[in-house]
Image: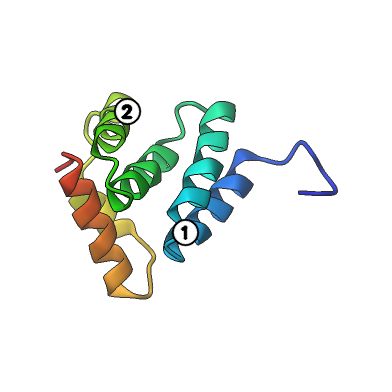
Amino acid sequence: MRLNPRYAPNYLWALGQARRLLQNYDDAIALFRRVITRNPDHLLTHVMLTTCYVERDRMDDARREAAEVLRINPDYSVEGSDNRSPYKNPADRERQAHSLRRAGLS
């Protein structure tokens, strides 16, 4: 990223995801917001922002992001996402699913 300032938004997403899994939600939120600036309809970024906001108990923001998830993909389901999640630790997958449901996604 230092060598190429025109890196793909997915680089920021990967950093945000790492921060989220380390439960450093404020840094993750900042990184995910940068992805949204560059790619407003990046579905997985809105999903991860939703989970971060729930974990920080920012429920209004979490519901707003959940609405964005459904705007981008009206057929989005937590169960479908859960089945595709590549997490080695089942607790990470469960925490994510729980957060998404708390934000109003089903």
Q: Nearer the viewer, mark 2 or mark 1?
A: 1
Residue name at image x 55 percent, y 53 percent: 14
The residue that mark 2 highlights is 68
Q: Secondary structure at mark 2?
A: helix
- Which residue is denoted by mark 1 in the rendering? 24
Residue 1 percent coordinates (x, y)? 76, 49
Dot 1 alpha-carbon crowd within 10 angstroms: few under 14, some 14 to 19, many 20 or more: some
Q: CA distance from mark 2 to mark 1?
A: 23 Å
Amino acid type at circle 2 is Glu
Q: Earlier in the sequence, mark 2 or mark 1?
A: 1
Q: Is residue 4 above or below residue 95?
A: above
Name the quarter where the C terminus is drawn: top left
User: Which residue is painted at 35% across and 43% down in the image?
Assistant: 47
Under circle 1, the secondary element is loop
- Where residue 94 appears, as percent x and y from the top left, is 23, 64
Contact, mark 2 vs mark 1 (Cβ under 8 Å)? no
Q: Neighbour class for label 2 at 10 Å: few (<14), some, many (≥20)? A: some
In this rendering, position of residue 19 left or right of residue 101: right
Q: Amino acid at mark 1?
A: Asn
Residue 57 horizontal/vertical position (percent): 27, 47
Give percent across and percent down for residue 103: 20, 41
Q: Residue at point 82% right, 43% down? A: 4
Which residue is painted at 46% across and 34% down in the image?
Answer: 42
